[in-house]
């Protein structure tokens, strides 16, 4: 599935490394001037040291290089560390999908203009 995404022409991936080892990754897509963050993850032992911020900055650079004017994402309303990261990076809530996830959690939709 990831291989198909990356070879689609609209999908992209970014890997973060620390001391020569992968410590996080990001998957995104860009279509019609919009970039969407699909997935971001950092290994637990590398959380809280700026890896997420580095990945987000690389996401923005990639979006700009693809001539995107805006960015979007969705995040579980209970994922407070991710919401804090996205807010610090300039995202703001623009909608909510009630009971979106199988556990009944809401999805918060966030966007920003580049």
Image (cartoon, rainbow, N blue to C red):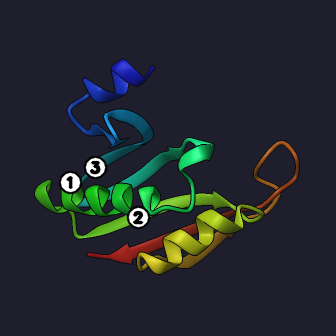
Q: Residues within 10 Å of mark 1 (few under 14, many from 20)?
A: some
Tag nearer the camera, 2 or 3: 2
Label 3: element kind = strand
Vertical order, 8 against 34 (above or below): above
Residue positioned 12% across, 57% down in the render: 65
Label 1: element kind = helix
Farthest-out residue, front: 19
Task: Locate the N terminus and report the quarter of the image it occupies.
Answer: top left
Of the numbered discs 1 and 3, the one sitting upstream in the chain is 3
Vertical order, 105 against 88 (above or below): above
Of the numbered discs 1 and 2, the one sitting upstream in the chain is 2
Tell me: 3 left or right of 62: right
Q: Which residue is mark 2?
A: 53
Residue positioned 20% across, 60% down in the render: 61
Whether pointer 2 and pointer 3 mark residues with C-beta atoms closer than 8 Å, the reply is no
Tell me: 91 left or right of 77: left
Q: Position of residue 104 (x, y in %)?
A: 87, 52
Of the numbered discs 2 and 3, the one sitting upstream in the chain is 3
Whether pointer 1 and pointer 2 mark residues with C-beta atoms closer than 8 Å, the reply is no
Farthest-out residue, right: 103
Label 2: element kind = helix
Q: Residues within 10 Å of mark 3 (few under 14, many from 20)?
A: many
Whether pointer 1 and pointer 3 mark residues with C-beta atoms closer than 8 Å, the reply is yes
Residue positioned 41% across, 75% down in the render: 89
């Amino acid at each position: 599935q990831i291989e198909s995404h990356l070879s689609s022409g609209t999908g992209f991936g970014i890997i973060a490394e620390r001391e020569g080892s992968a410590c996080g990754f990001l998957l995104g897509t860009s279509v019609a001037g919009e970039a969407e963050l699909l997935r971001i993850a950092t290994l637990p032992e590398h959380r809280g040291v700026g890896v997420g911020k580095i990945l987000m900055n690389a996401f923005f650079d990639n979006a700009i290089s693809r001539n995107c004017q805006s960015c979007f994402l969705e995040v579980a309303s209970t994922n407070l560390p991710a919401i804090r990261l996205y807010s610090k990076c300039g995202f703001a809530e623009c909608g909510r999908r009630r009971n979106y996830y199988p556990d009944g959690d809401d999805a918060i939709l966030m966007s920003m203009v580049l």
